C-alpha cells in the first residue's frame, strides 16, 4: 500500500503594490504548498509566472530591496531560501522602498 503524503500548506501575503505586476494574485487568498520559503515562492510563481524573477536575483537569492518573513521572523537564509515554513504558517513578501 502506498502512503500518500499531504504537503504542508502556507499562506502568502504581500504588499499591495505587487498586485500591479501580478494581477492574477489580486483579491485572492494565496495558499500554496511548501515546507521552505523556496518551495512557497516557487508555488506562487506557478500561480503568477514571473513572480520569482521579480523578488529573486539571477542566482535565486532575495533581491536587495525585498524583505521576506515567516510568521514573525525575518528570513535568515536570503541566498538559498531554506528557512522552514510551518504548516499553516504565513510568508510575508514586502518590497522595501528606498530614496528620499
Image (spheres, grey):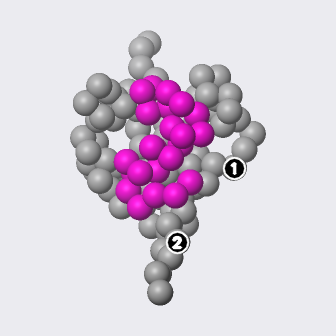
Along the viewing direction, whichever of 83 and 69 lies nearer the viewer: 83
Residue in view at x 41 percent, y 38 percent: 67
Q: Residue furthest right?
A: 27
| Label of residue 6 in the image | 2
- Determine if residue 73 is in view: no
Left or right, 23 with reference to 91: right
At which x and y percent is residue 91? 49, 51
Residue interval drawn in magenta:
32-54
Left or right, 42 with reference to 13: left
Q: Quadrant of residue 27?
A: top right
Question: Which element carries disc 2, helix, strand or loop?
Answer: loop
Q: Quadrant of residue 19?
A: top right
> Of label 2 and label 1, which has the lower sequence position?
2
* Disc nearest the viewer among 2 and 1: 2
Along the viewing direction, whichever of 7 and 23 lies nearer the viewer: 7
Q: Is residue 7 magenta?
A: no
Residue in view at x 29 percent, y 53 percent: 82
Residue in view at x 47 percent, y 81 percent: 3
**Magenta portion: prevailing SS class:** helix
Q: Residue furthest front?
A: 1
Q: Is residue 47 magenta?
A: yes
Left or right, 52 with reference to 47: left
At which x and y percent is residue 61? 29, 35
Check contact, mark 2 vs mark 1: CB within 8 A. Answer: no
How dense is the environment of label 1, judged by Cα within 10 Å: few (below 14), some, or many (20 and up)? few
Q: Quadrant of residue 70?
A: bottom left
Name the residue beneath numbered marker 1.
29
- Determine if residue 88 is in view: yes
Amino acid at each position: 500500500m502506498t502512503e500518500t503524503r499531504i504537503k504542508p500548506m502556507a499562506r502568502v501575503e504581500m504588499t499591495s503594490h505587487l498586485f500591479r505586476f501580478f494581477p492574477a494574485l489580486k483579491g485572492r487568498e494565496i495558499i500554496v504548498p511548501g515546507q521552505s520559503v523556496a518551495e512557497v515562492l516557487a508555488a506562487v510563481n506557478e500561480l503568477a509566472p514571473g513572480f520569482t524573477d521579480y523578488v529573486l536575483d539571477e542566482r535565486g537569492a532575495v533581491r536587495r530591496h525585498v524583505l521576506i518573513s515567516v510568521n514573525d521572523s525575518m528570513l535568515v537564509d536570503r541566498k538559498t531560501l531554506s528557512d522552514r515554513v510551518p504548516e499553516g504558517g504565513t510568508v510575508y513578501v514586502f518590497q522595501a522602498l528606498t530614496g528620499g
